Each structure stands twice: as structure tokens, then as C-alpha cells.
Image (cartoon, grey):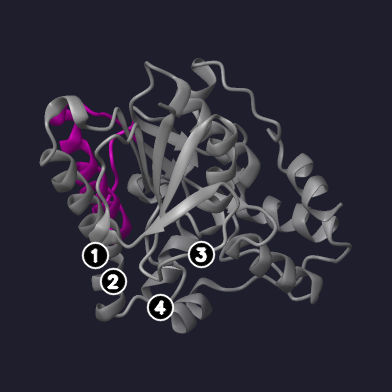
């Protein structure tokens, strides 16, 4: 019998390409979506969350989560929590209902570098303590929910993902539109670190972690060379053939975006220590190489 994988968020930006890669690795891939069936390469069939059964499944990938790049109302915060912590708790509960010999071998769960909070110039690897703030609290609760699967004999990996750059992805599409329009500039003083990663490297890193028998716990899903916001802005402007425009003051961001502005003004100098020590090779170590690929 072949290997089986279940992906929550298989219709999303990261999950879609990951499904195709897992299928190429010999997995039969089931996609989970509240909307029902989708058209995603590599996904053989679809289930709604309430219909999922992990019996006979080898790998569960949970990339579910409502987009957080929007104004944080109380209603949205509830949605952020339920789509991350709530979904993860449901996954672990379903795994716990299975006999021990029928449980998945691995749960690869999403997380974010926001767990580190705003840390200035401190280099942040997976051994670094969590930070403070709403997003750090949310990520910590998210990871704690996933970690409970370890007591069930399941290997658990939490990918702490940075800014994902790729065609069709929200971050890159929004950034390149602004800079192509000639109105892009640094955010605040621009000194905050932005841990980025090319989507191809992120998906490949996830496959690498899945195939590893020893990788577990938090894993920074970021490129080895994070950039300050001002430098990222300058390099992106150059890549799309535009000048860097005037900076966007922090107070203006807060007026327009509310609490979400704190994410854009905070910095995490996160580095992928675990991936590099395990021998993962990044195709796009430098931002210039990633932008050359995306603008080609």
C-alpha cells in the first residue's frame, strides 16, 4: 500500500504546490477544505473538515489559517484563533481517537515567526524563547495545541514561517503592485528585520522535514539571510525598475491598519538553524536571487 497524506489548506498558496510535490514523492494526497472539492494538482480527492478520518494516513499537514494581514477586529481575532488553534485541536482530537498503530506518523503544523515578538537585532533560532504580544500569544497557543500529538506517539513539526515570496502569493503580489506603481517605500524607520523565504524553498524545506526521521519541534521556515525592511524595499524597487518612494510613517500605518500595523513595524531576525544543520540546501539564500527569479 502506498503512502497517504492529508493536507489542510491544500487549496492555498503554499499547500497547493506542496500537494503536487508530495504526490511526486509517491503519496496519495487528500485535500481538506470547507468549500469541498477543488482543482489542485496532486490532490486525488477532497474532504470537508468534519469528514476527515486519519486511519491509514502517514502524514498530516495543517496549513489552515485565516489571513492575518488585515485589520484585527474582535470578530477577526476570533476567526484567527479558531482557524489555527481550533482546527489544530480538532486534528489532534481525531488522531487520539485512533488505535496507536493506526495513527499518523507525522503532524506538520503551521506557525509563524511572529511567535518571537519584536526582538530588534537579536538573531533568533529555534531555541530562542517566545516573545510578547498578541501574535506571539496566538502562535504559542497554536504550537501548544499541535505539540499535544507528541504524547500520542506522533512526530510533530511546527514550521515558523516568515514572509513568503512567490507569484500568486499575497505578500509578493501586494508588494510588487505597490512598487510598480512607484509608491513603495520603507515602513516606519525601516530598520526592522523581515524574515523572508521563496515559496519554492519553503515547500522543499517541508518535504525535506517530512522525509527526515529526526527533525521535530519548531523549525524556522525562513531564508538564511533576512533583510531589514529598508533594504528589502530598495532591492524590490530595483527589481521592478522603480525608485523607492517616501517612507510610510508608523503612525499612518496604525491609523489605516490598526493593531496589524504592529506586525509590519516589528522585526524578527529569524534564521533557519535546524534546516541548515540538517543539510537542507536553499536555492534562494539571498533576496536578490529570489527577486531575480520572481521578476524574470
Q: Nearer the viewer, mark 3 or mark 1?
A: 3
Nearer to us of marks 4 and 1 is 1
Of pointers 3 and 4, the one earlier in the residue sequence: 3
Q: Quick check: is 156 in the magenta stretch?
A: yes
**Disc number placed over residue 71 in the picture, else none:** 4
- Say what secondary structure mark 1 lies in: helix
Going by the image, does 136 lie left or right of 204? left
Query: Which numbered disc, 3 or 4, marks the residue closer to the eye?
Result: 3
Q: Tell me whether circle 3 and circle 2 mark residues in contact (CB < 8 Å).
A: no
Question: Is 155 placed above or below 184 here?
Answer: above
The location of residue 213, given as percent across then percent down, is: 38, 17
Q: Mark 1 highlights which residue?
A: 82
> What residue occupies the far bottom of the structure in this picture?
255
Element marked by disc 2? helix
Q: Which residues are magenta?
A: 128-157
Dividing the picture into quadrants, the one containing residue 61 is: top left
Q: Quadrant of the N terminus?
A: top left
Disc number placed over residue 38 in the picture, else none: 3
In the image, residue 102 sits, relative to residue 35, either above or below, namely above
In what element is the residue under mark 4?
loop
Q: Is disc 4 in contact with disc 1, using a CB cutoff of under 8 Å?
A: no
**What is the x, y in percent for residue 253?**
51, 76
What's the magenta bit mostly, secondary-structure-wise? helix
Tell whether 9 sits left or right of 249. left
Report if the CB atoms under discs 1 and 2 are less than 8 Å apart: yes
Q: Which circle marks residue 79 in the picture?
A: 2
Label 2 neighbour load within 10 Å: few <14, some 14-19, many 20+ = some
Taking the spot 38% from the left edge, 51% from the top edge, the residue there is: 114
In the image, residue 235 lies in the stretch drawn in magenta: no
Amino acid at each position: 500500500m502506498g503512502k497517504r497524506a492529508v493536507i489542510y489548506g491544500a487549496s492555498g498558496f503554499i499547500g497547493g504546490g506542496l500537494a503536487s510535490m508530495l504526490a511526486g514523492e509517491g503519496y496519495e494526497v487528500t485535500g481538506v477544505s470547507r468549500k469541498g472539492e477543488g482543482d489542485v494538482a496532486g490532490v486525488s480527492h477532497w474532504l470537508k473538515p468534519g469528514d476527515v478520518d486519519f486511519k491509514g494516513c502517514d502524514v498530516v499537514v495543517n496549513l489552515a489559517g485565516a489571513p492575518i494581514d488585515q485589520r484585527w477586529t474582535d470578530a477577526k481575532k476570533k476567526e484567527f484563533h479558531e482557524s489555527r488553534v481550533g482546527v489544530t485541536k480538532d486534528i489532534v482530537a481525531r488522531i487520539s481517537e485512533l488505535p496507536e498503530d493506526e495513527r499518523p506518523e507525522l503532524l506538520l503544523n503551521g506557525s509563524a515567526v511572529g511567535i518571537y515578538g519584536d526582538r530588534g537585532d537579536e538573531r533568533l533560532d529555534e531555541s530562542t524563547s517566545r516573545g510578547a504580544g498578541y501574535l506571539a500569544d496566538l502562535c504559542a497557543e497554536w504550537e501548544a495545541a499541535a505539540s499535544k500529538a507528541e504524547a500520542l506517539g506522533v512526530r510533530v513539526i511546527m514550521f515558523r514561517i516568515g514572509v513568503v515570496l512567490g507569484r500568486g502569493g499575497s505578500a509578493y503580489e501586494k508588494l510588487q503592485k505597490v512598487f510598480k506603481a512607484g509608491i513603495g517605500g520603507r515602513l516606519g524607520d525601516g530598520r526592522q528585520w523581515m524574515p523572508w523565504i521563496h515559496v519554492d524553498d519553503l515547500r522543499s524545506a517541508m518535504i525535506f522535514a517530512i522525509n527526515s526521521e529526526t527533525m521535530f519541534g519548531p523549525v524556522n521556515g525562513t531564508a538564511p539571510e533576512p533583510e531589514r525592511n529598508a533594504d528589502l524595499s530598495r532591492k524590490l524597487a530595483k527589481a521592478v525598475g522603480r525608485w523607492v518612494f517616501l517612507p510610510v510613517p508608523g503612525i499612518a500605518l496604525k491609523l489605516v491598519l490598526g493593531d496589524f500595523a504592529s506586525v509590519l513595524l516589528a522585526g524578527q531576525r529569524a534564521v533557519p538553524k535546524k534546516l541548515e544543520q540538517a543539510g537542507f540546501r536553499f536555492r534562494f539564500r539571498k533576496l536578490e536571487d529570489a527577486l531575480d527569479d520572481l521578476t524574470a
